[in-house]
Image (cartoon, rainbow, N blue to C red):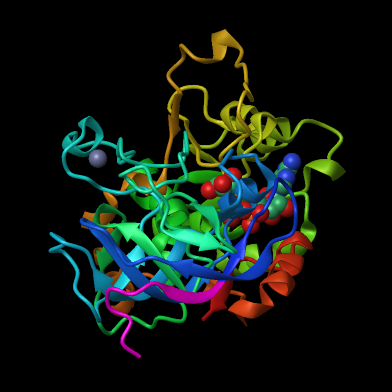
Amino acid sequence: MDTLGKTITCLAAIAWKTNSSLSLEEVQVEPPKAGEVRIKMISTGICGSDDHAIKGIIPLKYPFIPGHEGAGIVESIGEGVSSVKPGDKVLTLIVPQCRECSACLNPKGNFCEKQDILPSSGLMLDGTSRFTCKGEKIYHSFRTSTFSEYTVVPEISVVKIDAAAPMDKICVISCEVPTGYGAAVHSAKVTPGSTCVVFGLGGIGSAIVMGCKASGASRIIGVDINEEKFPRARALGVTDCLNPSNLKKPVQEAVKEMTGIGVDFAFEAIGLAETMVAAWDSCHVSHGVCIIIGVSPPNSKFSLSAQTVSTGRTLKGVCLGDYKTKDCFPQLVTAYLQNKINIDPLITHQLPFDQLHKAFELYHAGKTIRCVLLF
Ligand code: APR
Ligand code: ZN
């Protein structure tokens, strides 16, 4: 079928209003404009951030097509696009890399000014949408909208990967792997023999555990209210599991007792102010590093005992492992193909895209680490 330059009608999931269940609809996907790329999706993961978006915890414009952790094949490109061509295998980038803004030009960090997460316009860079459904304009999410058989993204939000990449699972390198594994190995630079605590043992937390283990941590404490997450976490490298609801004391006190004084590295991968404070308080008073990964609701605030700050601890927020996305994600794919990172244990379920509702049921029941939807 020759789709070049034509509007494509295909299946997509739409969030019509806050906290409603997604509906599978026939949508129209316009051709890419200048500087844009249209992608035929092959796989997409269900990430906590998509759930946050659907619930309104990350505020987006409705109605929108969710999804950001995606792998696909370029169907067509708009004028001026040079970094990808039709037929290329690609990953979508929730945080783009424009290479021009203050964030991209700084060697540290990666939160490109052209991102569309906080805040979100739901539109392409020119202020318009490429999606319609039943004649109504549909908004994009994070300029990725991967819960659709076809999507259009800016060129800065897509990157070409190795043609040997297995497309049924490589999508997790578009978010879960850099966010979790990268936070441990690239942002925190976990050291051999160190002690770590990971708050939240979902998809991101599991990838953090893998990164801590790969870095040679001697003790990895995993914290989750869902004990069903414990066996898999242990298999990935967690040495001690804590369920805060079963403790008679605050979880940070338990962590301090277990380690004598506090951990070298603490990670928060839930998105709650209270667990962020618990992560901070779990850290070694002198050199402890507290890494916040979870995305919390707007207006949510936390306060720290001011005296705990000046002793030397570090508090750092991390998005996608501080990797410059377009530069680094292809390298992570190559590292996987060379057996240097193993992403396979992070994917617990694979379902056809039209079984999206079942996938979300499994996610909400806490049964999945990552469920990947296949188109
Ligand atoms: N205390 C401990 N664990 C909790 C708590 C709590 N109060 N509340 C939830 N959890 C656990 C859940 O049981 C689950 O195992 O946190 C885990 C969250 O995992 P997922 O829902 O799989 O989410 P994930 O994709 O890992 O994302 C986690 O990182 O990137 C961000 O936006 C994302 O904020 C989200 C976070
Ligand atoms: Zn930028």
Is residue 29 shown above or below 223? below
Whether residue 310 appears in this view of the structure is: yes
Q: Is residue 54 left or right of residue 32?
A: right
Does the magenta segment cover residue 102? no
Q: Which residue is depicted at the point 84% across and 42% down? A: 245
Question: Mostly what secondary structure, the magenta segment?
Answer: loop
Does the magenta segment cover residue 7? yes
Q: Which residue is depicted at the point 53% across and 45% down? A: 196
Q: Nearer the viewer, residue 43 or 134?
A: 134
Q: Which residue is depicted at the point 30% across and 39% down? A: 112
Q: Which residue is depicted at the point 33% across and 44% down? A: 322
Q: Is residue 133 left or right of residue 243?
A: left
Tally the numbered discs: 0
Q: Nearer the viewer, residue 163 or 213?
A: 163
Q: Position of residue 155 (x, y in %)?
A: 25, 57
Q: Is residue 154 left or right of residue 15?
A: left
Q: Residue furthest front?
A: 135
Whether residue 241 appears in this view of the structure is: no
Image quarter for residue 164?
bottom left
Q: Position of residue 126 (x, y in %)?
A: 30, 44
Is residue 332 shown above or below 257? below
Which residues lie in the magenta part? 1-11
Q: Position of residue 253 (x, y in %)?
A: 71, 30
